[in-house]
């Protein structure tokens, strides 16, 4: 879209206003967490010596309020929130390893810039590995899939969450099967999906996944592995793996 001088002026003024507002009050917006837990700055060697360590006290409940701060360019606001998100995560990772506002911050970022995939990936990985929280992680993944249905990584993360936390082997197999059919997906995903389906007691689905993979695979080594996996499942050996 071609921007007129008025558009540029609005963008410039709103951006300056936003930066002054956000950065000017950021230290007042992040003053709660460690002060309440008793963690001191000496426990955080990378934190600034700027007084009491405070956390996010206020963030709007939804992105509509935030859009009023930067009507000309919401991507700028998403970038600023992303910087705050990374700083917030890093500071807590070095101290109390508690992240009560992380999901809300990521939710706001992905509301403002849903086409941006990295916040979805970041949340999926962090909630699984660092926080081990199913609900916020799977909600971000499902939200990401609304905008990026053809992204195999989000389907893979969904399969992992369903397998690891929900103990839903069939759901995990379905998600990994979706991931395996998408461009860029690694070749081993079909075999992994088949293994999960077989362990969940759905041998026919497992065999079907392998046969579909064989039709799409041209690598002889991968074909050999898939045939071997199919034989194991049909002979009931796959259930013990």
Image (tube, rainbow, N blue to C red):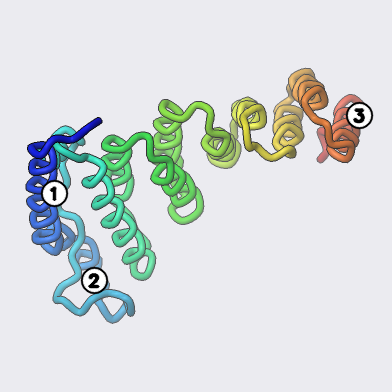
Q: Is 148 displayed left or right of 172 in the figure?
A: left
> Which of the two marks, 2 or 1, is nearer to us in this view?
1
Marks 1 and 3, how far apart in space?
62 Å
**For residue 38, above or below residue 187:** below
Q: Earlier in the sequence, mark 1 or mark 3?
A: 1
Residue 112: give x, y in percent of width and height: 26, 37
The residue positioned 70% from the left and 32% from the top of the image is: 193
Identify the secondary structure beneath mark 1.
helix
Q: Which residue is the site of mark 3?
A: 231
Q: Earlier in the sequence, mark 2 or mark 1?
A: 1
How many marks can you see? 3
Q: Is 57 displayed left or right of 108 in the figure?
A: left
Residue 217: give x, y in percent of width and height: 80, 30
Identify the secondary structure beneath mark 2.
loop
Q: Which residue is the site of mark 1?
A: 15
The residue positioned 84% from the left and 38% from the top of the image is: 222
Q: Is 64 in front, or is 205?
A: 64
For the C terminus, give its image quadrant.
Answer: top right
Q: Say the numbered circle drawn on residue 38.
A: 2
**For residue 97, above or below residue 59:** below
């Amino acid at each position: 879209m071609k921007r007129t001088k008025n558009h540029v002026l609005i963008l410039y003024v709103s951006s300056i206003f936003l930066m002054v507002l956000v950065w000017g009050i950021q230290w007042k917006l992040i003053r709660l967490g460690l002060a309440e837990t008793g963690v001191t700055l000496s426990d955080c060697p990378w934190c600034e010596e700027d007084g009491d360590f405070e956390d996010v006290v206020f963030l709007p409940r939804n992105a509509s309020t935030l859009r009023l701060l930067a009507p000309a360019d919401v991507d700028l606001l998403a970038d600023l929130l992303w910087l705050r998100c990374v700083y917030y995560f890093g500071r807590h990772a070095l101290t109390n390893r508690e992240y009560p506002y992380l999901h809300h911050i990521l939710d706001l970022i992905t509301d403002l810039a849903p086409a941006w995939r990295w916040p979805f990936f970041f949340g999926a990985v962090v909630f699984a590995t660092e926080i081990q929280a199913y609900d916020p992680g799977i909600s971000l993944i499902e939200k990401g899939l609304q905008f990026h249905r053809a992204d195999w990584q989000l389907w893979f993360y969904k399969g992992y969450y369903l397998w690891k936390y929900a103990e839903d082997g069939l759901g995990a197999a379905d998600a990994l099967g979706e991931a395996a059919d998408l461009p860029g997906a690694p070749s081993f995903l079909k075999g992994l999906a088949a293994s999960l389906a077989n362990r969940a007691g759905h041998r026919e689905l497992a065999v079907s996944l392998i046969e579909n993979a064989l039709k799409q695979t041209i690598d002889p080594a991968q074909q050999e592995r898939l045939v071997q996996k199919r034989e194991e499942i049909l002979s009931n050996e796959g259930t013990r793996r």
